[in-house]
Amino acid sequence: MNLRCDLRSDTVTRPCAGMRAAMASAEVGDDVYGEDPTVTRLEDRLAEMLGKEAGLFLPSGSMSNLCALMSLGQRGDAVITGKPYHVNAWEAGSASVLGAMMLVVLEPGADAGLAGADVAAAIFEDDPHFARSRILSIENTVSGQAVSLTRMDEAIAPARQAGLAVHLDGARLFNAALGLGVDASELAARADTVSVCLSKGLGAPVGTCLVGPREVLYQARRARKLLGGGMRQAGVLAAAALWALDHVLPELHADHARAEALAEGLGKLGLGQVRQATNMVHLHPDPSLGDVHALLAAQGVLIGAPHPESRMVLHRDVDDTALEAALSCFDQFSSV
Ligand SMILES: Cc1ncc(COP(=O)(O)O)c(C=O)c1O
């Protein structure tokens, strides 16, 4: 198969020559000893950008979320989160298996945010029968959807009132900020800890940075070690992330524009229900079209497996030519 356009995820990007050159020339040291200057530079830079005291570079978003929960709470604590949010749905149950925490899951609204009343009702009374409600874990973007500041505030208010800590899974924080037209620090200011992936829309090959209060991040460093996530000369990876902050972040809007163009093109072809938000497009294909996913794959256009919607994610390795190729492949279904 000649791969023409890979829309499955923004995690499929490959480092370009500029990023690879930055990685090759990175100054490195043993980061478990705290001696990798490039990792330290990345942690400090993201902490500063997001208005937090400290940062911690981790191998993945899943580990970053787990380290945040393990640092904000303890075994036996209850974490309130959204049912489809990554922490609950896509991390192999790690908060329960490894964090020994109870997840209390809420159904988000159509805008992917949690309702304040639902959060308030999910907070347990202080009673020996119940787990201690300790953390609210929110997400932005959620499947591409940017949750508004108002909606975030609505969910957070009852949690704060009851003394809960707030973690924000901002795997795509910069897409959320762009979608809402605000600075990423405004989103970050609402949470104690924020997890930001470098390996998604930003295009770095590996890595996530957790930012938050120095004391919490000290605990997170221990949790990272416990989970086997301490990395040695990780500066080669941090260098890619720093390069991405300089060169990819300023261009992130192009992914959103191409997502709009893709949604518009699919809408014109009348293939089914289409919705687009930030860098993602979801298509619920008309069943008469057959196995769209497989037919496109045979022609070198990869989209997410139908669940039943198929997800398409725009990223820096999808340029206008690749997008055109995808749209022309979709075109064959318009006459089915
Ligand atoms: C919202 C969200 N959080 C966390 C993660 C986990 O990131 P990783 O795959 O690096 O563990 C993902 C991955 O897609 C995600 O979409």
Image (cartoon, grey):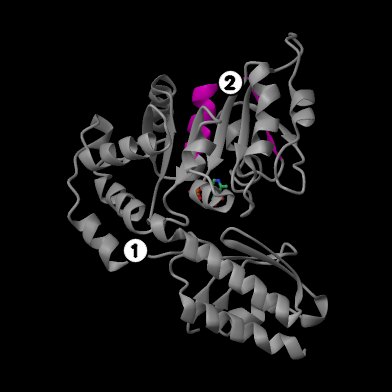
Q: Which residue is at the front of the view, 104 or 273? A: 273
Density class for disc 2 (Cα within 10 Å; few <14, some 14-19, many ≥20) is: some
- Residue 15's label in the rendered image is 1
Q: Secondary structure at mark 2?
A: loop
Q: Quadrant of residue 287?
A: bottom right
Reply above or below: 317 against 251.
below
User: What residue is rendered at 41% in x and 19% in y?
Assistant: 215
Indicate the quadrant containing the C terminus: top left, top right, bottom left or bottom right.
Answer: bottom right
Residue carrying label 2: 75
Reply above or below: 53 against 114.
above
Q: In the picture provided, is 4 more to the left or to the right than 90?
A: left
Q: Report the span colored magenta.
A: 63-82
Q: In the picture provided, is 87 more to the left or to the right than 46?
A: right
Q: Amino acid at mark 2?
A: Arg
Q: Which residue is at the front of the view, 180 or 217? A: 180
Q: Amino acid at mark 1?
A: Pro
User: In this rendering, does residue 3 appear at all?
Assistant: no
Density class for disc 1 (Cα within 10 Å; few <14, some 14-19, many ≥20) is: some
User: What residue is rendered at 48% in x and 65% in y?
Assistant: 254
